[in-house]
Image: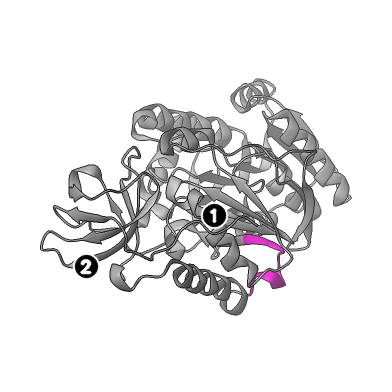
Amino acid sequence: MAEKIFSTKGGLPKVKLSHAPAGPNAFKRMIDTCDRAEPGQLVAVYDKNNNPFGVALYNPRSQITLRIFTRDNPDEFQIDDFFEARVARAVALRHDILKIPEKSDAYRLVHDYGDGLPGITVDIYKDQIALEFYSLGMYRLWPNIEAAFKKHFPTATFHHRASSYTQEMEGFSIKPEPGPSRKTRITENGVQFEVDLKSGYKTGFFCDQRENRQFASTFAAGRSTLDICSYTGGFGIYAAKAGASSVTCVELDPEASEMSKRNANINKVRIDPVCADAFTYMRQMLELKRRYGLVVLDPYKLVANREERDKGIFKYRDFNRLALSLVEEGGMFVTCSCSGMVSMDEFSFIVRGAAANSGRRVQIIKKSGAGPDHPVAADYPEGEYLKAIWARVY
């Protein structure tokens, strides 16, 4: 393991706020003065009256200049004690309170702001731990973070991930792991999946949909099922194991589509993996007058930033209009959004509009989000990113 690179000995650079943020993030306009801080460094934060405000990660090139992860007095702050306490608290939530390992060996260990560690998410897949970084500061602290996790998972192997967008915006670079793919097989609610720690989206799998996959499977028996934007077949394979009459998994990424086929074989079920653009495929099925008893729509993030908002909202409307048109009379529809910038109220409005445009009557029976291993900080509601709406369609 690399040496831990940060120490609070000698004091931290000082940042003074012109006014205090309501949540854990401070933007450039909120900063009065900054003393000798470098990008990605830990800084001591003080309010406009020079009272201690907390400790933060500093990056002047980021949209979020300060990520304030503790309100502790900076003079008393010790980085290793801090990480050990936060990681222990996060692990205790999953193991002692939620008891996630009883139903899955893949789950989220740290959920960003929800666990008081802004700028990072951590997922575990059996004995493999994937750290996904969203900030330069957290990336520079990876040796300290891994040291804290080693106390709970001494035999784990660690992997580092970050999107190209994050690396460009935050100003760091993660070199790809050398060698062949690093695959492991996980079990979730009795369903097995293969996860590639080196490729794929996010950390390789979407643990946030665990409870939603299981609930959707309760409607699958005897129904033809269409899993749109299926990635590696999560919803579709659950449906097949629950007795769906047929399962079609539509995914544009050829590697993910191929993995859905392997996952079906692992679970000894049959699916029809279709590698195609979802919009094109749905329109083709409409022309063929195909209908399905269960349709699941789980697209990638369509609203990643404010500049893409209008375009993303339009895509959500079109996606849902087409998908609703493919549900048979009395069938079930599950639609999801993982865009944090789209609230549940707004997503519900989109679905209502799509129902009207498709000429369908929709009974909403449930609304849900990510699993409980994805906690949301009360002062950071944006962390409640995943929305799922469950409906019966006529």
Q: Position of residue 247 (x, y in %)?
A: 76, 41
Magenta span: 99-107
Q: Position of residue 149 (x, y in %)?
A: 60, 66
Q: Which mark is residue 142?
A: 1
Q: Which mark is residue 194?
A: none
Q: Residue at x 72, y 64 (%)?
A: 105
Give the residue type at disc 2. Pro
Q: CA distance from mark 2 to mark 1?
A: 26 Å
**Residue sitting at the far front:** 10
Quadrant of residue 155 within the rendered picture: bottom right
Q: Residue at x 62, y 38 (%)?
A: 327
Give the residue type at disc 1. Trp
Q: Residue at x 32, y 63 (%)?
A: 11
Question: Which element type, helix, strand or loop, lies under badge 2?
Answer: strand
Q: Is residue 242 in view from this perspective?
A: no
Compare residues 175 and 110 and report the one nearer the observer.
175
Above or below, 93 against 16 in this view is below
Compare residues 239 and 16 and report the one nearer the observer.
16
- The residue at which mark 2 appears reads as 52
Crowdedness near tag 1: few (<14), some (14–19) or many (≥20) residues, C-alpha within 10 Å: some
| Residue 120 as seen in the image, left or right of residue 313 | right
| Residue 353 as seen in the image, left or right of residue 16 | right
Q: Is residue 382 in view from this perspective?
A: yes
| Residue 217 as seen in the image, left or right of residue 65 | right
**Residue sitting at the far left:** 49
Q: How many marks?
A: 2
Q: Mark 2 or mark 1, which has the lower sequence index?
A: 2
Quarter placement of the C terminus: top right
Q: Residue at x 53, y 33 (%)?
A: 164
Is residue 379 one of those drawn in magenta? no
Above or below, 168 against 333 in this view is above
Quadrant of residue 216 within the rendered picture: bottom right
